[in-house]
Amino acid sequence: MVDLTQLMENEVFMAFASYAAIILLKMMFMSSATAFYRMTRKVFANPEDCTGFGKGEIAKKYLRTDDRVERIRRYYV
């Protein structure tokens, strides 16, 4: 079994751990940013998300696309 100190000295493992941490932080930030933009601009992707703003025809006006929200959503890739 490999000691933790040996793993910490391995440059390849440290590079992998650093990149994995960066990707995880980016994912967490981007999900929060997307939710923030969707809520502030009242733009939702499916009917279940906009039920808090009303039912029926009132909720349908929030089912649309916005360029800013789509730009943030595409940053995931």
Image (cartoon, rainbow, N blue to C red):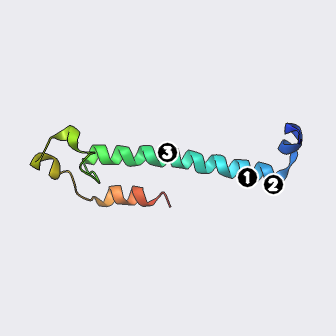
Amino acid found under the numbered disc labelled 2:
Val
Q: Amino acid at mark 3?
A: Phe
Question: Comparing marks 1 and 3, which lies closer to the viewer?
Answer: 1
Q: Is residue 2 left or right of residue 32?
A: right
Q: Mark 1 sits on what residue? A: 16
Q: For the point 29% across and 43% down, which residue is it?
A: 39
Q: Residue at x 44, y 47 (%)?
A: 31
Measure the C-alpha gap from mark 3 to mark 2. Answer: 26 Å
Residue 20 place in picture, x, y as percent = 66, 50
Residues packed near mark 1 inside 10 Å, few (<14), some (14 to 19) or many (20 plus): few
Front position in the image: 54 or 14:
54
Dot 1 amino acid type: Phe
Q: Earlier in the sequence, mark 1 or mark 3?
A: 1
Q: Mark 1–mark 3 contact, CB under 8 Å?
A: no
Residue tagged 2: 12
| Horizontal arrangement in the rendering, residue 64 relative to residue 35 (left or right) | left
- The residue that disc 3 covers is 29
Query: Contact, CB < 8 Å: mark 1 with mark 2?
Result: yes
Q: How many marks?
A: 3
Task: Specify whether 56 is left or right of 27.
Answer: left
Q: Is residue 64 above or below residue 21?
A: below
Residue occupying the point 43% across, 43% down: 32
Q: Residue at x 84, y 44 (%)?
A: 7
Q: Position of residue 46 (x, y in %)?
A: 27, 52
Q: Are marks 3 and 2 in contact (CB under 8 Å)?
A: no
